[in-house]
Structure formats: C-alpha cells, structure tokens
C-alpha cells in the first residue's frame, strides 16, 4: 500500500526545491493529476480505442515570474537546474552553450512554443517540478497523452 503522505511529500519537495533553487517563495503551486492507460497506449492519436483512468498520484509545479527573459528550470527529484534563453533553444542549448539535459527538453519546448505564440508577455518564469508519479513503467504519467 502506498504511503498516505506521498502526495503531500511531492508538494513539499516542489516547495522546498523551489526555495532552495531560487531563494524566494513561488507565486503559484499547481498539481497535475496522474493517469494510467489501461487500454490503448499510443493509439489515442490514431483514433484507436483507449481506456485511461485517473490515479491518486500527481506531479507538482511551483513557479514564479522573472523579468529578464530567461527561464531557469529545476527538477526537484533529480536535484538539477538549467538556465536557458529562448534564443538558444533551436540548438537545444543552455545559456552557456551546453546541450540541455534530457529532462529539460520538454519544459524548454513549452517555453519556446509559448514565446512563438506571443505567450509570456516578455516575462518568463522559474518553474520547479516534483514528481509524485513513478518515472518507470509504461502508460503512467502526470500529464495527458499528446
């Protein structure tokens, strides 16, 4: 049986890692509920039959705005951070020209897509993620299928 404190533990990790990484309080903390696909993994976007179900695990995101046009992302569970500008994302590089770590590619892509659509209003953010959903296994995740 799962530890009943697990859910609050992921939230607490997101808050603690945000404070430790960015030295301030987040403006917002949000929860992305987990799900499993009991039937139809990877066929939903091909008009196949699917049977997703919500689960009691979630991912948490603590976030605050920043005024300088950069994005600094922290992964609480990996104890890693990365800083990038939107100008270096076509080459998938951080602010110092190093390749972005694999875990940072999705949040970098989201930031780039928002910027291309005029989102963010010139203000970008410091997000910090904490996982309450195990990273192993197929058909499980904190976010819906694309």
Image: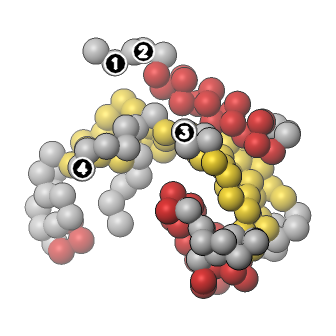
Depicted 89 relative to depicted 70: above or below: below
* Disc on res. 77: 3
Q: Secondary structure at mark 2?
A: loop
- The quadrant of the rendering that contains the C terminus is bottom left
1 vs 3, front mark:
3
User: Which element is circle 4 on?
Assistant: loop
Labels 3 & 2 near each other (Cβ < 8 A): no
Spot the residue most to the right.
Answer: 67
In which quarter of the view is residue 123 placed? bottom right
Q: Which residue is mark 4?
A: 139
The reply to whether dot 3 and dot 4 touch (C-beta < 8 Å) is no
If you read the primary sequence from the N terminus, does the residue marked by circle 1 or circle 3 appear first?
1
Which dot, 3 or 4, sits closer to the camera? Answer: 3
- Disc 1 vs disc 3: Cβ atoms closer than 8 Å? no
Give me the disc on residue 4: 2
Q: Position of residue 82 (x, y in %)?
A: 68, 58
State the residue at coordinates (61%, 30%). Answer: 13
What residue sits 12% from the left and 67% below the top?
48
Residue 61 visible, this angle:
no
- At numbered mark 3, what does the secondary structure look like: helix, strand or loop? loop
Q: Position of residue 85 (x, y in %)?
A: 75, 73
Count neighbours of disc 3 (C-alpha within 10 A) and say few if under 14, some if 14 to 19, many if 20 or more: some
Q: Earlier in the sequence, mark 3 or mark 4?
A: 3
Q: What residue sits right under mark 1 in the picture?
A: 2
Callout 2 touching callout 1 (CB < 8 Å): yes
Near-viewer residue (92 or 130) = 92
Q: Residues within 10 Å of mark 1 (few under 14, many from 20)?
A: few
């Amino acid at each position: 049986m799962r530890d009943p404190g697990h859910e609050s533990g992921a939230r607490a990790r997101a808050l603690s890692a945000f404070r430790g990484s960015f030295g301030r309080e987040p403006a917002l903390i949000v929860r992305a509920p987990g799900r499993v696909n009991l039937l139809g993994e990877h066929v939903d976007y091909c008009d196949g039959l699917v049977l997703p179900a919500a689960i009691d695990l979630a991912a948490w995101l603590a976030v605050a705005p920043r005024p300088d046009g950069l994005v600094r992302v922290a992964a609480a569970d990996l104890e890693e951070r990365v800083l990038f500008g939107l100008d270096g994302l076509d080459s998938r590089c951080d602010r110092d020209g190093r390749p972005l770590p694999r875990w940072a590619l999705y949040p970098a892509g989201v930031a780039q897509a928002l910027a291309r659509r005029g989102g963010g209003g010139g203000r970008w953010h410091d997000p910090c993620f904490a996982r309450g959903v195990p990273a192993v296994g197929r058909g499980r995740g904190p976010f819906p299928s694309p």
